[in-house]
Amino acid sequence: MASVSTAKTGEPVRIFFICQRVPFPPDRGDKIATFNEIRHLARAHEVHVFCLGDGAHDLDNIPGVRDHAASVTAVRLGRPASRLRALGALITGGPLSVAAFDEPRLHRAIRQQFDALKPDLIIVYSGNVARYAEPFAQVPRIMQFSDLDSLKWGQYAARAQTPMKWIYATEQRRLLDYERHIARSFSHALVCTAAEQRDFERLIPGVPVSIVGNGVDLDYFRSAGRAKHPGSMVFTGVMDYLPNVDAVCWLCDEILPSVQAEIPAASLTICGSRPSAAVRRLAKRPGVRVTGRVADTRPYLDEAELFAAPLRLARGIQNKLLEAMAMGLACVTSTIAWNATAIPGGEGILATDDPKEFVAHIVRLLRDGEYRALMARRARGAVEANYRWDMQMARLDRVIAAVTGSPTPAGSPLPAEA
């Protein structure tokens, strides 16, 4: 495990930050976290970003990162080559998701910059791109898992049919082996929730791990007081992502018809980019609107009376949930999504996995304006108390200080959960 610091006391740390996508705009889970971390770190350190472009359009987002980073190196992820690498890994025995993101051009760029700049620290966000930092054990390396992706593949396997069931289960085993290898060879590991920390300590015992959670921009996500549409619910997210697709299909199949039997005007807006064919078909249902990509989700959140998110395949804290709560929306969600938060039940969140209870929660909130307003105030208060970005970034600062020997802005010790 790398443990020797090359940072000089009192000087900024030169950081290589490696991530899966261009970390701008902050409009999906990993981009929200990486953008806010880079923006924070760049205030005190020299940050060089290395990432893949999620299609050609993603490379157009680079200027938004250059406003904060000392440099940005992005390589477009070639989809045909990515699929071929994943297929090859299926045959040869490696994790498919790691192989899919293993672009030789980005390896070369990082090696060249490493030799030229000699960083003091490497931070990797997502195990899928940890391979880019593997050759550099001579400097401290922080592996930010966010969540253990191997467990996500296990969830997929539990719900899939053959042959995908076998592929997902195989990926779970292989990826867990790789996550163990990375965690044990890097200086420190990060996860984003207490539940993920418990899973990590159970599956990868004896490795130092800390929590650096997600946050929400409380100034940006604030209700503008737009008029509410009576009976309206909203769901936001990237709508070709399997957990989101599963959630809205279940919501429309199992929940919405029963709600509309009680409240005929009840409606659901599904707001997010890249809706899959299954999601687009939902727009044919009474009261369902599918927006596709929108420039700003806030008006859709602000005009809804509640946020409904029956996520059954969730891992880690859900940014969509934090954003809805910050906008002052009462939320009805699944227990797995709620359990990832630090928010007590009833403090803006009502959680259940039972369809009848889910319907009952929604109907009560839509009918009882006073109760809905109370839950909305509690939702905003809960994220203000638990999910300010400065709280999470202070934890990151302390981990960086511990692995590099550099001082933190406040001289704080390593987080207690490490």
Image (tube, rainbow, N blue to C red):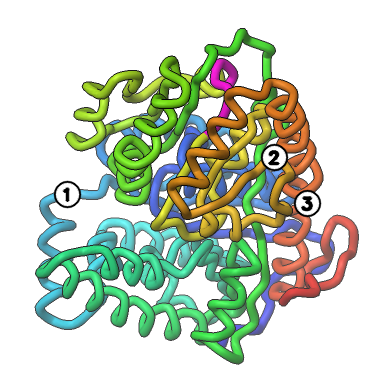
Position of 85 relative to 68 (above/below): below
**Marks 1 and 2 in Cβ contact (< 8 Å):** no
Position of 64 relative to 264 (above/below): below
Quarter holding the C terminus? bottom right
Snapshot quadrant of residue 178: bottom left
Quarter holding the N terminus? bottom right
Q: Which residue is mark 1?
A: 79
Q: Nearer the viewer, residue 212 or 339?
A: 339
Q: Nearer the viewer, residue 122 or 10?
A: 122
Across and down, in percent, residue 398 comes to 77, 65
Q: Which residue is mark 3?
A: 391
How many numbered badges does the structure rendering display? 3
Is residue 1 part of the magenta span, yes or no?
no
Magenta span covers which residues?
Answer: 302-307
Q: Residue at x 78, y 56 (%)?
A: 394
Q: Nearer the viewer, residue 253 or 54?
A: 253
Secondary element type, mark 3: helix
Q: Which residue is mark 2?
A: 348
Could you tell me how far apart the alpha carbons at marks 1 and 3 are, in whole angstroms? 37 Å
Q: Is residue 291 visible?
A: no
**Marks 1 and 3 in Cβ contact (< 8 Å):** no
- Closer mark to the observer between disc 1 and disc 3: 3
Q: Residues within 10 Å of mark 3 (few under 14, many from 20)?
A: some
Snapshot quadrant of residue 301: top right
Q: Is residue 136 visible?
A: yes
Pointer 1 or 2: first along the chain:
1
Snapshot quadrant of residue 12: bottom right
Q: Residue at x 14, y 58 (%)?
A: 83
Pointer 2 or 3: first along the chain:
2
Could you tell me how far apart the alpha carbons at marks 1 and 2 are, in whole angstroms? 41 Å
